[in-house]
Amino acid sequence: LLTSLVTGLSTNTTYNFYVKAVDANDNFSTASNTVSVTTSNIPTYCPANSSSTAAERIQRVQFNTIDNASTGTAEYEDFSAISTDVRKESPYTITITPLWTGTIYDEGYGVFIDWNNDGDFSDADEVAFTKAKSKITPIVGTITIPANAPYIGNVRMRVILQYDATPGPCGTINFGQIEDYTLNVK
């Protein structure tokens, strides 16, 4: 039994595989039957985490039909099972409500959307919304779905609340919370 690991494949793509044998004289056999395989449309995302949600965290996220009272204390919450449909070129209001357990601190906010579904948030237009540190609550902004969003279907939306700074999409923050959701681009 011979196995092989194929890497570097794109998400949501069909690949055809076949096998040929080669002998010591570099003679090749005919190709085996072709096997067609389609990769998943769910990429592996860059990790994001927080050291603590003890003093501040996300209380609620509202975006189109998403209305999630997210009062958990986990540093990272995977709410990707919660989704909403969005349409290209349409504006949507995002509302993020923080929760402080005592002292009210300055919080920065970031919303990142993986428009091309490649597993990162570093491509054009993937920083969908940011808010510099403040004590305002709730935070309200507008996200317009880009006309040139390259992927139709489910994409990841990451919402981050970070103590005293505007967050990036990946890595570990000292204090705050990260939540992931799904947008279905139509």
Image (cartoon, rainbow, N blue to C red):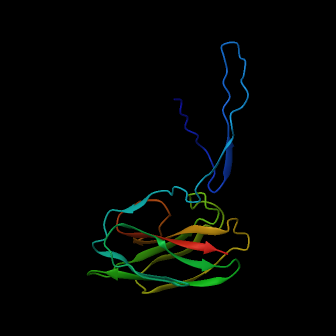
Q: Which corner quadrant holds the C terminus?
A: bottom right
- Residue 97 placed where, x, y %? 42, 83
- The number of callouts visible is 0
Is residue 173 visible in this depiction of the protein? no
Pick out the residue farthest to the top: 25
Is residue 89 visible in this depiction of the protein? yes
The picture quadrant where one finds residue 25 is top right
- Residue 73 placed where, x, y %? 31, 72
Q: Residue at x 29, y 75 (%)?
A: 55
Residue placed most toward the observer, 16 or 41: 16
Residue placed most toward the observer, 20 or 159: 20
55 is higher (above) or lower (below) than 29: below
- Residue 157 placed where, x, y %? 53, 70
Q: Residue at x 55, y 57 (%)?
A: 43
Residue placed most toward the observer, 41 or 64: 41
- Residue 113 placed where, x, y %? 57, 68
Pick out the residue farthest to the front: 33
Q: Residue at x 67, y 68 (%)?
A: 152
